[in-house]
Amino acid sequence: MGFDLMHFNLHKTFSSPHGGGGPGSGPVGVCPELQPFLPIPVVEKNDDVYRLNYDKTHTIGKLHGFYGNFLVMVRAYVYVRMLGASGITDVSRNAILNANYLKKLLKDILEIPHPQHCMHEFVASGKSLREYKLKTTDLAKRLLDYGFHAPTIYFPLIVPEALMIEPTETESVETLEEFAKVIGRIMQEAKINPEMLRRAPYSTPVRRLDEVRAAKELDVCFRPD
């Protein structure tokens, strides 16, 4: 496609999780002219044996002692091969359809700062929760009690109390509608009993993380009783 360098974001249509601060695994491809400058070590094959080559004259050096989440890439590769070219096209269309449908369902529940047609994701805002001294974090934690993993929150930064929602290409209409109903239910809970949201989740094995204390005392992960 003419790019010199490209980061392959394996989440979403390539089936990988959007957790851990990123796509789970983020391979980077470069054009032939940039190959001599790749960080070391480089995996090379000689006589049917794979080796790590640290001796590259023009390398930018070693960046980090981590070789990536290999199985995440294998899963993405298998997923693509199973779908084939026509399948990838179909699920991509489904991702766009699902995102726009869910955005429509949520438009009267959450503020949608950019209501125009979207692609595979859209951004909502939970800033109306501030009226009850709550944050998007509280909404996200409460979602866990209803069996939904929270979407990406506080990104993009230009949207206050942002929720970046990406319904997957394989979710059913029933699941999308249930997600919207749960969001509506949580917003009602915020009005009636905001303290309940502040202490959520209740269904998980561990208590709510005390973020301020955890930042100050790195060996403390959970809020004391």
Image (cartoon, rainbow, N blue to C red):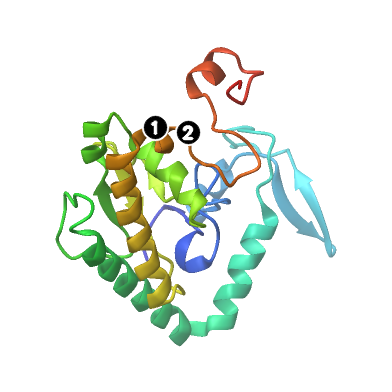
Q: In this view, does 214 lie to the left or right of 165?
A: right
* Residue 97 x/y as whole percent: 30, 74
Taking the spot 53% from the left edge, 16% from the top edge, the residue there is 213
Numbered circle sitting on residue 133: none
Neighbour class for label 2 at 10 Å: few (<14), some, many (≥20)?
Answer: some
The residue singled out by tag 2 in the image is: 199
State the CA–CA distance, disc 1 to disc 2.
7 Å
Nearest to the observer: residue 70 or residue 44 = 70
In the picture, the quarter occupied by the C terminus is top right
Q: What residue type is labelled 2?
A: Arg
220 lies left or right of 5: right
The answer to which quarter of the image holds residue 209 is top right
Q: Position of residue 162 (x, y in %)?
A: 29, 42
Q: Which residue is drawn at 64% across and 33% down?
A: 64
For disc 1, the marked residue is 195
Q: What residue type is labelled 1?
A: Glu
**Disc 1: CA contacts within 10 A as few (<14), some (14-19) or many (>=20):** some
- Residue 156 seen in the figure: no
Marks 1 and 2: CB-CB under 8 Å?
yes
Nearest the eye: 152 or 61? 152
Q: Is residue 63 above or below residue 122?
A: above
